[in-house]
Amino acid sequence: MPTGVVLADAGYGIDTAFRNRLTEMGLIYIVGIQSSISLWPPEMGPLPPKAWSGRGRPPSLIRRHPEHKPVPAKELAQSLPASAWQIVSWREGTNAPLSSRFAAIRVRPAHRDYWRSAPRPEEWFLIEWPQGDTQPTKYWLSTLPEDTTLTDLVDQAKLRWRIERDFQELKQEIGLGHYEGRGWRGFHHHATLAIAAYGFLVSERSRIPPSGQRSATFLKAPRLPKGYRPRGSPAATRTSRRQLDRHSSH
């Protein structure tokens, strides 16, 4: 599994130019998309360029046909057989593990590919369709490797929730959103300190149950010094008076 994956919601993922640029930069992504995006189903793609007639320039653009064209993501998802769907859990919730029904297939994005000379490479098309719902609820495209398992695809797609939660805590609890300067250097210093503080707190929080292991010695009260008496106790008062008497006699 790659160590670095770009995550984005459908507001960015629907932008073909954005996804293309990520690929050109050598970055792997898993991004949300809208149900209306056009996709070529598995084992299907655009038609090759027309045969050259011997006159003019040879045709170079791939083609579609009324009976051979891409379909919307929603339509493709709804056409999948029941065997394509699996229940996958991705993290612990408040009361129980979070799980839903998912399917993943290999597709080719088709947005305006009739202006291209070659089809786009295959990608993963991940769909979430919770049991009991009348239609799928979420869709993703991903350039994760072809041998990626459905569980790993879901884990990566659902990581965006954790990132949003991190930003929310950074802004509200640590003060990342309190910066009011205008310079890059000042913001860089402020953000660096906020992220470092947040990282420390997350590390400490991970040691506390239920995230950490329960232990009988965890958070054990420190041993009190020999002869310690709580302030205000009768024993402490008598001891203080004896000490005062000894000082006054000298």
Image (cartoon, grey):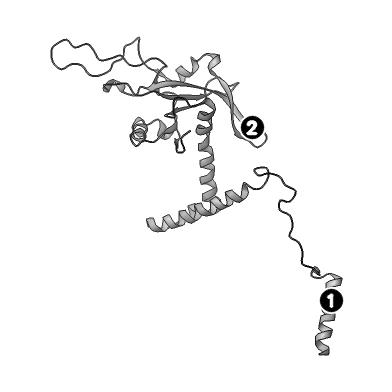
Q: Which residue is mark 2?
A: 97
Q: Viewed as shown, does residue 93 lie left or right of 139? A: right
Q: Decide: is 59 above or below 153.
A: above
Name the amino acid type tagged 2. Answer: Pro
Examine the rendering and report whether any part of residue 169 can be seen: yes
Q: What is the number of the mark on residue 27? A: none
Q: For residue 238, what is the image quadrant?
A: bottom right
The three-letter code of the residue at mark 1 reads Thr
At x 36%, y 24%, the residue is: 121
- Mark 2 neighbour density, 10 Å: few (under 14) some (14–19) many (20 or more): few
Q: Quadrant of residue 27?
A: top left
For image coordinates 50% across by 15% down, the residue present is 80
Residue 54 image position (x, y, % from top left): 14, 11
Q: Secondary structure at mark 2?
A: strand
- The image position of residue 207, as x and y in percent, is 64, 48
Question: Label 1, on which residue?
Answer: 239
Query: What is the quadrant of residue 35 in the picture?
Result: top left
Check disc 1 and report its element: helix, strand or loop.
helix
- Residue located 62% across and 46% down the image: 206
Residue 155 image point, x, y percent: 53, 32
The image position of residue 232, as x and y in percent, is 81, 70
**Left or right of residue 215: residue 227:** right
The image quadrant where one finds the C terminus is: bottom right
With respect to residue 168, does 187 lie above or below? below
Q: Residue at x 34, y 37 (%)?
A: 25
**Sequence-earlier tag: 2 or 1:** 2
Q: Around disc 1, counting alpha carbons within 10 Å, would you say few (fewer than 14), some (14 to 19), or many (20 or more)?
A: few
Closer to us: mark 2 or mark 1? 1
Q: Can residue 175 be seen here? A: no
198 lies above or below 63: below
